[in-house]
Amino acid sequence: MRLSYSKCGIGSFGLELKSLGRCNNCSEEALVNIRYSKKKLCPECFSEFFVRRVRKTVEEFRMFKPGERVVVAVSGGKDSVALLHALKKAFPEVDILSFYINLGIKYYSDHLQEKVGELAEKLRVPLEVYDLRSEGYTIDDFLMTKYKHKMCSICGTIKRNIFTRMAVKVEANALATGHNLDDTVSTMLSLFFNGDFESIKRLKPVINPLLPKHPRKIKPLITTPEIEDLYYVYLNKLPVGECDCPYGEITPIKDVKAILDKLEDKQPDVKFRLLSVFRKKLIPLIVDNREKGEEVLSCKICGMPSSSEICSKCRKVEELINLKRTAKYESIEIDDVKELGGDVVLLDVRTKEEFLISTLPGAINIPLEELEKRLAELKPYKKTHKILVFCNTGRISYSATLKMRNLGFRAYNLRGGLGLAGKASSLRKE
């Protein structure tokens, strides 16, 4: 059984599940190797192991109690999908709801919304969707701002704000997110290297509310390795997003993750040990020395916790809205190459096989999966040319366009791809 997955910030990875002999818990065929506990489990026993650990984590850190309302922030990725499913199995009596934020990332957010809807229906869990476009902007719009190199940070700030507002609205006691062991430890290390101790203290398993009637924030997967979320989702046949976030593979966190993965090869429990050191040793020191006397305000615009009159999210959104009102705001999608004027490079990001069958005159071919490795071929055009990126439908090329924009290229996506290009006289192949 071959599994593969793409995640924002770390790129794509895959693995193959094959027979490992008999399950340590029963006589069925084992497919999952839990190295740090020296166990080989069959799909059913692994699922029970996974759910049992989630239950234990919730109980150990007193994340919520019977009678409380819990909302799960679901993105459509494997972590939050596994979290919602496991929580529902571990605590069938608890009032659990699910939230999804449609970030307006073209060709991507709507796909994830469909997957989250399927999951909520399958589990019979109420789902509430918040569409960012109702506020007059999308995450994509920030690509035209000074924050274009911090898209993951911008996205996180906005999602945290809105999820909290949604949780307050339904009077939830706890807001659960899918942060796993790998996420937490790699973020802790990255923040530690940068000396950002204020952010480290927010990585605790439970973060108590800063304002009255706000939910505590909980991480039931904080002791769960990321790869096991992938096992759980696929072995339980759960609906999950099938395409990578266009803003993935641009964050330095993936480098820290790679270092940890190498350490894990020789020390299977290294991530657990690092989590323990941060949680039991470092975070208490940071909290004791820095939390005293801190003042928490309510943002005068959205009402969420803030260190100033206007929170970070509202300030950034206000900057964006003001920019969109001016002529400085530029769309990255076009219908015709004539809109770009001269000095244009045509970039076909489809597969080599598709390129050889048909393409646009003068186009060069770099498939999307090879783009990061072959950027050197495009660097001569970085300052002198505009790059029109295209594929069959516009979806894959849109993702490539966003990646190139983040790397400083003047890239544009051909709206609708070759399906519409054939109707444009300036793009029609002779």
Image (spheres, grey):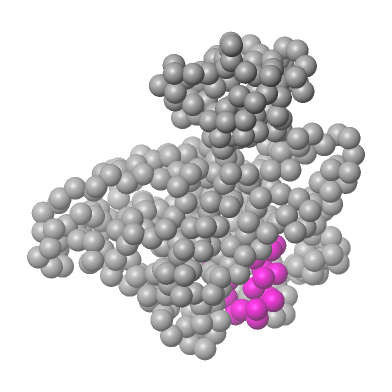
At a point 30% along the width and 50% down the height, the residue shown is: 268
Q: Is residue 371 left or right of residue 42?
A: right
Residue 34 belongs to magenta span:
no
Q: Nearer the viewer, residue 422 or 363?
A: 422
At a point 73% along the width and 43% down the height, the residue shown is: 141
Image location (x, y in percent) of residue 35? 25, 53
Name the residue furthest right.
326
How many callouts does the rendering have?
Answer: 0
Residue 312 appears in the figure = no
Residue 167 belongs to magenta span:
yes
Image location (x, y in percent) of residue 15? 30, 43
At a point 52% along the width and 89% down the height, the residue shown is: 67
Q: Is residue 37 left or right of residue 206?
A: left
Image location (x, y in percent) of residue 304? 75, 68
At a point 40% along the width and 21% down the height, the residue shown is: 353
Residue 46 appears in the figure = yes
Quadrant of the drawing holding the C terminus? top right
Name the residue furthest bottom.
67
Q: Name the quadrant containing residue 247.
A: top right
Query: From what the image shows, is residue 15 above or below residue 343?
Result: below
Q: Nearer the viewer, residue 69 or 134?
A: 134
Query: From what the image shows, is residue 287 above or below residue 409?
Result: below
Q: Nearer the viewer, residue 378 or 206?
A: 378
Q: Name the quadrant containing residue 307.
A: bottom right
Q: Is residue 156 left or right of residue 183?
A: right
Image location (x, y in percent) of residue 170? 65, 78
Q: Is residue 158 left or right of residue 418?
A: right
* Segment colored magenta: 161-180
